[in-house]
Image (cartoon, coloured by chain):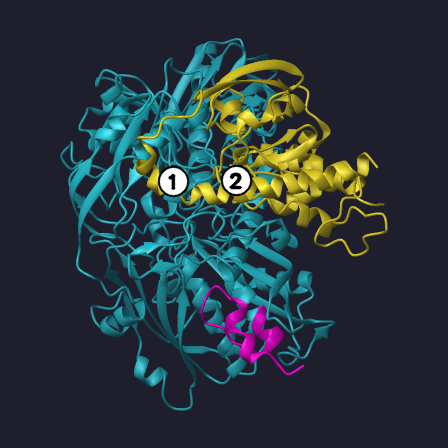
Amino acid sequence: MPPPIEFQVRRRTLLAGSAAAAVSAGFTGKAGAQSGATPAGSETTTVSLTVNGEAREVTVDNRTTLLDALREHLQLTGTKKGCDHGQCGACTCSVNGNRVNSCLSLAVMHDGDEIETIEGIGTPEAMDPMQTAFVENDGFQCGYCTPGQIQSARSVIEEIRAGIPSHVTGDLTAEIAITDEEIRERMSGNICRCGAYSNILAAITQVAEESA
Amino acid sequence: MQFNEPAGTNLFDSATIVGKDHTRIDGPLKVTGAAPYAYERHDVVEGQLYGYPVGATIGHGTITAMDTEAAKAAPGVRAVVTTLDIDPLELGMNNVARLFGGSEVMHYHQAIAVVVADSFEQARAAANLITVSYEEGEAVDYSLDAAFERMEGTGEPDTQYGDMEAAFSDGAVTIDQMYHTPGESHQMMEPFASIVDWSDGGDLTGWISNQMINWTHGSLATTLGINKERVRIESPYVGGGFGGKLWLRADTVLAALGSRAAGAPVKLALPRPMMMNNATHRSATVQRIRLAANPDGSLRGISHENVSYCLPGGRGENATAQTPLFYASEAMHVKNHLAEMPLPETADMRAPGEAAGLMALEIAMDEMAEALEMDPVAFRLANDTQVTPSNPDMPFSERHFAECLEQGAEAFGWDSSRPAPGSRREGDWLIGQGVAGAFRGALALPSGARAAIENGKLVIETDMTDIGTGSYTILAQTAAETMSLTMDDVEMRLGNSAYPVSSGSGGQFGAVSSSTGVYAACMALREKIAQQLGLEEATFADGQVGSGNERQSFLELDVEAVDSIQWGDFMGEFQKATFGAHFVEVGVNVYTGETRVRRMLAVCDAGRIINPVTARSQVIGGMVMGVGAALSEDMALDTGRGMFANHDLASYEVAVHADIPEQEVIFLDTLDDVASPLKAKGVGELGLCGVAAAVANAVYNATGIRLREYPLTLDLMLDQLPEV
Ligand code: FES
Ligand code: FES
């Protein structure tokens, strides 16, 4: 099964986005040189988002990441900031059904988008199956990487079922099996310094099997 | 409560909750994003502003000028405080480098300014506008090898007994090698973060991320020069620490100074790229180990010298920590050296000492087994001891190292015939097995708690923290067990300086100390309840109290008790420690030298395991950190600038999902009645101890290439791989 067209497009968008981010990062040390420049337009933007099914409007500094819009403006602090540089996965949340590192995306790029955060997935009283599986399998310790792991875990099962290949997929034309190797590979953008990896794998496998 | 004699039979021997699996009671909060970490406390105080730090960009020297004009004029900025604005702050407990104040730069990324603004983006942008002039310190020789050469053989040995010269002569089988371990960074997932309200410069409240509430409470008061009574800190959820959050750090100090300057509460997190050089880390080590053995495998001599670096007055990494206690030997010489260097501060990281020490010693043991043509498991068994090697009058309270090795070998399918290195191949992969011993001391500290019946619940308050270790759950288990209640009857409140002082979380002492503190408070509560009800000889069972057949519930009472555990002198007659054995199987790619860990097993002898679920997680987490230490973690020193160059999570490589294979943990059901009333010790650091050496030994078994330098990267192996 070929990967869905929509996915290919998004990959390209993402690549272009990260290249731009890398270039601008090279200049941050010289911010002083820009201090005299007048901004070309307004420094803030009002963005309409649907967050966990609810319409929300936020006025943010144009430099505000989606992550900080969620954590600081909407006070949805379940999505974590581990590095702010796309290196750890703690900020993983879902945008229009795809997982993203929300620290690598500016809030102003998301006008009209549907965002789902960990708070939208379940509550302590009514947990989603993946959240329950993480508790049952002790798939965390300090809990700081956990919302990101859970967001990625849910997406990984969907991505495999949608036929999106990974680095370890052997046969690109066959149906992709949900194996330990596939899960580990696809989860590798989510660091857990507490080292709960094998318990996280058990939790994901449990949910995949239950929902098969 | 005094612990003045071995525990004897007590209620934990017939426990129904302690020692049993229990999922984390804080789990539902953590998996739903509802557990609030330090930076996330929007609810605690109105009008929070954002702080952003500036770090020094020289390794050491003096700041001659700072220009903050542009920063102060930048949009949204409320305050700028530079290190030149204030006198050097007092050092807090175990702080070696000054956290702020004055013109001296002791290390790279030392905090030198804080900018406070209405938004995070504004604070960050303004921080970038500050320009700094320095006078750089003299060039420094950062070579730890050179320091070792200079210092070897100098100073009084830390341990010295027997005739070393004789041990290494007359037909002894000997090995003599140098070992290198790199600097390692905690890199806990939650950055150092604080919200501090010191708006009026009077009472201070801090919502911080910290392992040791009492120490940090005192340090914050000392550093800011205010009375401890005026300071309160909270740290109910901590996103990992690993020793990095034992002490007061710059985030809290900067937030406090920023708050006072701006007259409003300030939140500040250290940016990830600043964590490695601003905060503490595990020093690199250079170690020389010499072993001498009789042909039957019994050790005649052990010599272990180590050097690590630290700032003047610092502690470095004592990689010899385990050596005087681990293996029997006729003679021994142990010496730890410290080389002063102007580098970021070195301090405790998970299993400080043993983690780096066993990375070397357990390779040396493997090398000696090979020189003796012995199975490395059998060689270790031959040198087990039940007493302190340097002092046979001091026995171990409990030591089941031999069982760890034997049960582990059995469960792992250890091949004691030891096929020749490089002889097992599957496809492109050379397969090898390695073993290493694990040792870590079992410290206990005084620890207190308050136990109360409030609104039909048993409430436990203690300043103990849960840094992922499972404190919430194991303390609730201890309380429920002691009061004969259920887990649902218990409400835990942790991590607040308003609560009784506990041991805090560190050094593998947290579980044993704080569980005993809670036990003490609950026993005191039982007495209060009996008094209030006028009962003599009261017994507690099934949630009821009474004597004889008269029984009643006690959850309607209004009663409280505070107590703490004090550890008796009798414990000093024993050596207390935890033991383990790690078994690892690796594949090494025959073309590229890439190492992949295929499976791992740990067997742990750590006293009663209070909760096998959370304890197992501690151990597998240690094993994961051990894989990182073996294969990828390496703080890369820029010797020109005296800083660590790979200071983020993209370039300091910790283990990820794809690196971690099947892991198994076996807990020996050992009870140590000298260790605590629960007969428990600790396990959080044991899981890391020895893992990296087991990987290195497995790589040797797979390839015949003996690496004595971590991480075990493929460039070290490429020119030595067997012909294909
Ligand atoms: S916070 Fe976004 S990847 Fe780390
Ligand atoms: S649970 Fe602590 S980092 Fe994953």
Three-letter amino acid code at the position of disc 1 = Thr
B1 vs B72, nearest the viewer: B72
Chain B rendered in what hue?
cyan
Q: Is residue B4 visible?
A: no
Q: Which residues are magenta?
A: B698-724
Residue B52: x, y in percent?
Answer: 34, 31
Relative to B308, does residue A177 appear above or below in the rendering? above
Q: Chain of mark 2?
A: B
Q: For mark 1, what is the residue?
A: A28
Q: For mark 2, what is the residue?
A: B9
Three-letter amino acid code at the position of disc 2 = Thr
Q: Nearer the viewer, mark 1 or mark 2?
A: 1
Q: Is residue A60 visible?
A: yes
The secondary structure type at the circle numbered 2 is loop
- At a point 63% along the width and 24% down the height, the residue shown is A115
Question: What's the distance in space between the residues labelled 1 and 2, CA to CA?
Answer: 65 Å
Q: Is residue A151 magenta?
A: no
Quadrant occupied by the C terminus of chain B: bottom right
Q: Is residue B713 magenta?
A: yes
Residue B74: x, y in percent?
Answer: 30, 25
Relative to B238, does residue B164 appear above or below in the rendering? below
In the picture, measured across the screen, residue B330 lies left or right of residue B689, that is: left
Label 2 neighbour load within 10 Å: few <14, some 14-19, many 20+: few
Label 1 neighbour load within 10 Å: few <14, some 14-19, many 20+: some
The secondary structure type at the circle numbered 1 is helix
